[in-house]
Image (cartoon, rainbow, N blue to C red):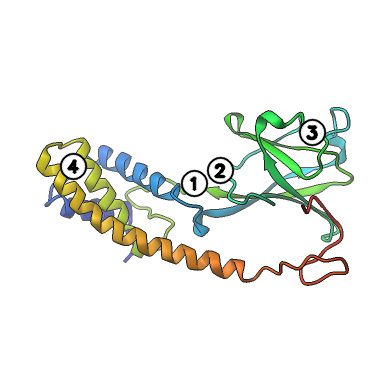
Amino acid sequence: MIFTGSNLYDFTAKLLLNYQMDKTIFYYLLNLAKGNREQMRPWVILRSEDTSNNASPAQNLINNSMYLTPFTLPADFLNHYSPKRSLIGVAADGITFRWYSEIPLERKHEYKDDNSKFYVDLKNSKYFLCGILDQPYTLHEFYIAASPDITDSTSWVFPAQFAPILAFDVAKMYREMFDYDIVNVQQGEMISRGADVIYKQMNEWDGNLQESQVEGIDNYQGIGGGAGFNQNVVGDN
């Protein structure tokens, strides 16, 4: 079954013993619950890639450095999920790469000449490369994307079997935030047990996805090669 917002509204009403809450309140709580669940871990299903930005040597404007040249973050950006290689520059030849790892905003001056670093100005939805470019690159940014709000006719990006967790979350929040008394608090705790069961399944599913990805990595990076080795690389440290 596909759980649209309308389906989740009906399911939430059943959890609340057939009480149908105001729909404005429902969709506020539903998307609040969605956001909470999406930020609990770096879910594989929310991992995304943006390739809309290109960088070139002509942008080495300040003291032959890129570090004050802005690039725009994706509109659905939440955070980078990898401690290294969150950003990769790919040259037109397809074999030359620049791998970047993120540094704090306040250390941009310290690392301005480092070809393997970048930083984010989240308030202004921008990011910046450090170092100097030798040729044009397409920037591949890997990040966690926020999913669109759920409406009457749309569904969550997660597999359908996990969507009811949001109805459990909404029912619990409603009991405890809008209909508060000791009995409803106890009922809210009982409702949350259903969410706990689904969340356990979600964690196991995502863990298996992450494990299958890691198993495909060849860690050998010695001189002379090995699977995945490419000597035309900047910033592989």
Q: Give the left or right position of residue 196, taking residue 209 as reference.
A: left
The CA distance from mark 2 to mark 3 is 24 Å
Q: Position of residue 134 (x, y in %)?
A: 89, 45
Q: Amino acid at mark 2?
A: Phe
| Tag 1 secondary structure | loop
Q: Which mark is on residue 112?
A: 3
Percent of width and height locating residue 205:
44, 66
Q: Amino acid at mark 1?
A: Ala
* SS label for mark 3: loop
User: Closer to the camera: disc 2 or disc 4?
Assistant: 4
From the image, tell me which residue sits under label 4: 175
Task: Identify the residue shown where x is 55% and y is 55%.
Answer: 47
The type of residue carrying mark 3 is Lys
Badges 3 and 1: C-beta atoms under 8 Å apart? no
Q: Residues within 10 Å of mark 4 (few under 14, many from 20)?
A: many
- The residue tagged 1 is 146
Q: Could you say which is closer to the camera, residue 155 or residue 202?
A: 202
